Image (cartoon, coloured by chain):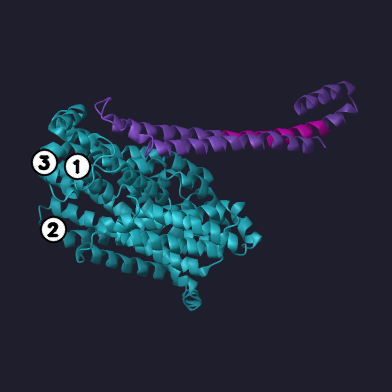
Amino acid sequence: MGIVPGLKVSKSSEGYVAGDRSMNLLLLYFVLGASIFSSFAFLGGPGWAYSRGVAALYIIAYGTLGMVPLYFFGPRARRMGVKYGYLTQAELLSERYQSPFLSILLAILTVVVLIPYLTLQMKGAGLVLNTISDGAIPYWLGAAMAYGVVLLYVFFSGVMGVGWTNTFQGIFMLSIAWFLGLYLPKELHGGIGPMFEAIQQEGLGNMLQAPGLQSDGSSWSWAGFSSAVMISAIGFSMWPHFFMKTFAAKDDRTMKLTVVLYPTFQLFLLPILFIGFSAILSFPGIEPADTILPYVLRNMDLPVVLVGLVCAGTLAASMSSGDAILHAAGAVFVRDGLRKFPQLRTAMDQKNVERKVIQLSILLISILAYYFAVISSTDIVSLLLGAYGGVAQLFPLVFAMFYWPSATRLGALTALISGIFVTLVFLFWPELKPWDIHEGIYGLMVNLFSLITVSFLTQKTDSSIVEKFTHA
Amino acid sequence: MISKKQHGLMYSVQQPSKKPVVRWFIAFLVLIQFSLIWPIYPLVGYIEPIILGMPFSIVWVLLCLLLSFSGLLAYFLWEEQGQKRQGQEQQRQQQQSHDVLSKVEQSKILTKDTTTNVSFSGGVKS
């Protein structure tokens, strides 16, 4: 399904990466929407509702406005893309701040933050296939099979393949989510109202009281909840695989309307959370909480067809996010990383192999992610949350690119490096934090401070370059 | 002459009138954001009242989501209408300057028509 549309777009990397800048509203809506319906949403969402109650609402809370910055940045970035041929956000930023070094830095950052994201998707796929087959397909084989298919269509058709498959998978997942979210509470408790009443009567009312619980079962602090929502809302639109899609939009109107319609996708997360709530009383004590959906399915005597459909839905969720991520990571690594080294660029141009090199990087990145998913036992969820803190550090740079003419190269570089440094320090040594808020917020504060002070202290960027952006 | 003056008129009226709306829109977005976290969400994030079977902590987040969706949609439509009006305005101006030209030519034949034309463009200016 994914390969056919790829035959229609051109063979250049513009065709491969941005679908010849021709995505219409339907495609763009589902590409952006389905990417968020990742296995985190299908497995992590119910898992959070199951173990932490309304804390899971944070997923809806940050998504409510998380996409809105693209309403303002998106059309500008898109027009710049059409005019100067840009395909990634690093290309924009390195031109504005006149720094190839920034571009290489961003390429590394992109791959580093996308790998845990991808690993999570692979784990989801492996888990689901393992569950439906009742263990007949081992976890490692399941992950490998699902991502073999993803690789195949990402390889041959690029972003248009991603678009069409996401549209089909998206519609499919939405139907599954609503069906299960209404069916399970009805089957287990006789409806949504009785379900919440029962939870309250069992003395678990604090699960339903905002902001819910922490993973150890104690109440989450407002500072913790609020800063997690903030950092995710800021980082959301900065994920390279989201931001890059602005270049694939057909026109400004499509871009804006996609952002406007985005909350309708968020609404579909609600039934997914109901799945988790419905299991609190019926299936207590499941560890890890993320496996609650497959566990419920296996233990409820549901028709085989239904279980199959749900697993296919989760698999679709995992794959539709995975493909967009894989695709973005490969494209950014080559265009913003490798191409900034002059020898490599001439070599690639002479042999006209850029597209092949992107495909090769995609293969390498997926092997690396597979390693983390199957062999290494690193805690991926905490890595992903850390990655959000890192991605959010791009926000001040992107904002200043379009709206603050005084921002300079050194300002941008110190801002990004110091922001990431502070985020990493508090990620690995949380006991150093003065208050219990997300480490990314500390990073952002330092980031903003350095961007402003250093920009004032250093010489301004050539106004002809700045105006290209502020008047875009 | 006339079209130049009207250009000036258009900028002096439309440009500043767009800014407050953008500012209100951004204020609206900030308000929504803080309704979803501290300090507003703690005031309302309780179980009671239960609406449609759901605790109010959940209903509130959904309300914010719907509100931000309606706000975004309204802003998008407003922007689009502004563009359309701007396009029409420009078209009308072209039309008008075209009309004026043709009427000036007509006035060589019919003097009565010119007087109505002058009063019309005077009305636009004020």
Label 3: how many Cα within 10 Å (few below 14, some 14–19, many 20+): few
**How far across and down, in percent of the image, does residue A387 sit?**
34, 57
Chain in purple, by letter, is B
Rendered-image quadrant of the C terminus of chain B? top right
Q: Earlier in the sequence, mark 2 or mark 3?
A: 2
Say whether residue A37 is visible.
yes
Q: Position of A150 compared to B1: left or right? A: left
Question: Which residue type carries mark 3?
Answer: Phe
Say which mark, if any, is on residue B37. none
Is residue A364 rendered magenta in the image? no
* Chain A as rendered: colour: cyan
Question: Which residue type carries mark 1?
Answer: Tyr
Nearer the camera: disc 2 or disc 1 = 1
Q: Is residue A466 above or below residue A361?
A: above
**How far across and down, in percent of the image, does residue B70 sit?**
44, 32
Marks 3 and 1, Cα distance to the nearest angstrom? Answer: 10 Å
Q: Which residue is mark 1?
A: A50
Q: Earlier in the sequence, mark 3 or mark 1?
A: 1
Nearer the camera: disc 2 or disc 3 = 3
Q: Secondary structure at mark 2?
A: loop
Which chain does tag 1 point to?
A
**Mark 2 on the same chain as mark 3:** yes
**How far across and down, in percent of the image, does residue B66 sit?**
39, 32
Q: Is residue A194 above or below residue A415?
A: above
Q: Which residue is mark 3?
A: A283
Rendered-image quadrant of the N terminus of chain B? top right
Residue interval drawn in magenta: B79-101
Q: Is residue B73 above or below residue A344?
A: above
Instruction: Find the residue positioned furthest to the front.
Output: A434
Q: Which residue is mark 2?
A: A137
